[in-house]
Amino acid sequence: MLEADVEVDRRDFAVRAELAVAPGERLALFGPSGAGKTTLLEVIAGLVAPRRARITVAGRLLTSTAPPPVAVPPWRRRVGLLRQDPGLFPHLSVRDNLRYSGHADQAELESLAAALGIEGLLGSMPARLSGGQAHRVALGRLLLSRCDVMLLDEPYTGLDAALRRTLSELVIASVGERGIPAILVAHELAEAQAFADRLAILDRGALLQTGAPDEVVGRPASRRVAELVGYTAFVPAGGEAGASLRAGPVYGVHPDRVISGSHEDRGVVLRGIVAGCRPSGARWEISLRTGEATVTGRLHEPVPADAELTVTVLDPPCFGPDGVAAGQSQVRS
Amino acid sequence: MSWVVSPQQSAVPGALRLANRWLGVGGAAIVWLLLLGPVIALLTHLSWSGITSALTAPGAWQPLIVSVEAGLITLVVLVLFCTPLAWALARGTLPFPRVWEIGVLASLLLPPLVIGLLLIFLIGPYTFIGQILGHFNIYAVNTFLALVIAEVYESAPYYVLGAQAAFAAVEPRLEQQAALLGDPPLAVFRRVTAPLATPGLAMALAVAWARAMGAFGAVIIIAYHPYGLPLQIWTTLQETGLSTALPFALVLLVVALPLPIAAYLWSARARSRRRG
């Protein structure tokens, strides 16, 4: 079990977070750039000194600012960190990079290399590797280091989707097999959802919500969380007459939870004029002007511009004027 | 070296492109020859009989031995005392880093002759340091120690700046990664920092060696005796003329050059190995 209660100063704000990740559990830290996600990982890894912290891994105290202060140095923490930059040692071959920590025997190294698809590269120097190969080697080196916690700081940024999925599956399998806690920092929600058992939303140093990925996305605790997980519009709740976007409660509209047609039993029905329609993946992204707000939705069929359209926002979350969640929708038309 | 042709260049007529290329090669060759001019002049003005008679004279090899010994001790001093300074400068671990860097630069910019003059005020027999050394019968003027001190002063800034650049080129994240993989700081230095910085350190040391072997300005002021090779060349020139001094210049070149050339070839090989 990794338990971290951390408060660390940054130039513009302080990062405050309390996390507990069980053995074999995968937590994704999701938030915008500069939210303090990497800082949090660096404190856990012992690379950044916190103002106040208590960090334990499997009951082993790694950091404590309370007297008597404890600060186990990075080389004794057994905390593995994988960053976006694979950080391979350029003067060592792939084989020597993999066995850098000195824990792996030859058979283990070769079997992991085969699992990662790098068995043919063991004699190569890092400069000869492609970005994807270098990431596989860095992951292999981390897995062979026998760490007690795995920290992944946007490790797959810049890689193609197929490779990201492969590497993510390898990490998931490895975390489960070894029964160690893992934290992934991600700024893409899909990546965080694909990896995590639990999703934590961090914004400007504050942990806004923690929960199962579908719960956080489907039931955001606040309007800010909703914005961060992809809700692109907010429409007035409480009926058409007198409803105000600023003063009253609002429904959050997620583009992926918009369907065409009127389905009053499934959510909030909106009517408006199509302002634009463009392809988005295998769907069509429409912009719908409805009174005070312009709503975006991804539909299965294209709709011509300026057409009148009725859509249903499936079970949207409702937020009070203070931005805090006020439950789910009531049927509205 | 590869020639990358951009679309704009490819629109230039072939003959013009060829002329442009040869103009570039010709210009570079002229500068290269001008730089090598003194070496070429040395080799073309030497006679075999002149070399043998100069080098077989009694005591002719003593300055060479003095220079090599003083040069080697200088290198040891630089490695032991200046490497940690260069590392600290590269990692920014010292307070007010610019002040330290300006100090190193100032010693680089001082003319060697001025360094020699100022060293008299620092370690001369009537100075505080000179008197302390005198208590132990150690003298830092016109002694072998004075020669080493002068060579250290003349070569140290070159070594510090070169070594600083070599350490700065090592990505701190790699050192962090090594620590997270279980290496304590000394092991990180031995397994990551040192191997990655060594090609640059070797070049810095080679430059320092060349400066130490050729040190003259400070040496002539505080270490006129015992003669090293540069002073041997100077006094021979004064006493018997250019033709007798030239063989010693060749000796200086032969002794001073192999280390820098070896360091250059070794670092080029290390870099090429890293590229796979």
Image: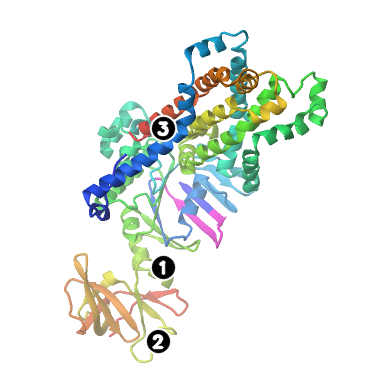
Magenta span: helix, strand or loop, mainly?
Answer: strand
Q: Dividing the image into 4 quarters, which one contains the C terminus of chain B?
A: top left
- Which percent across, then down, holds residue B226? 68, 18
How far, Cα to Cα, is label 2 from label 3? 62 Å
Q: Marks 1 and 3: which is nearer the front?
A: 3
Front residue of A200 and A190 = A190
- Which percent across, then down, holds residue A224? 43, 70
Chain for numbered disc 3: A
Other residues around mark 2 within 10 Å, as few (<14) / some (14–19) / many (≥20): some
Front residue of A317 and A133 = A133
Q: Tell me the number on the disc at residue A225.
A: 1
Q: Magenta part of the protein: which range?
A: A6-23
Q: Which residue is mark 3?
A: A100
Chain for numbered disc 2: A
- Which percent across, then down, holds residue A218? 33, 67
Dividing the picture into quarters, in which one does residue A93 lie?
A: top left
Q: Amino acid at mark 2?
A: Ser
User: In terms of sequence position, does the residue under pointer 1 or pointer 3 come before the other?
Assistant: 3
Dividing the picture into quarters, in which one does residue A176 lie?
A: top left
Task: Please tell me which residue is depicted at 27% across the width and 69% down the height of the picture.
Answer: A256
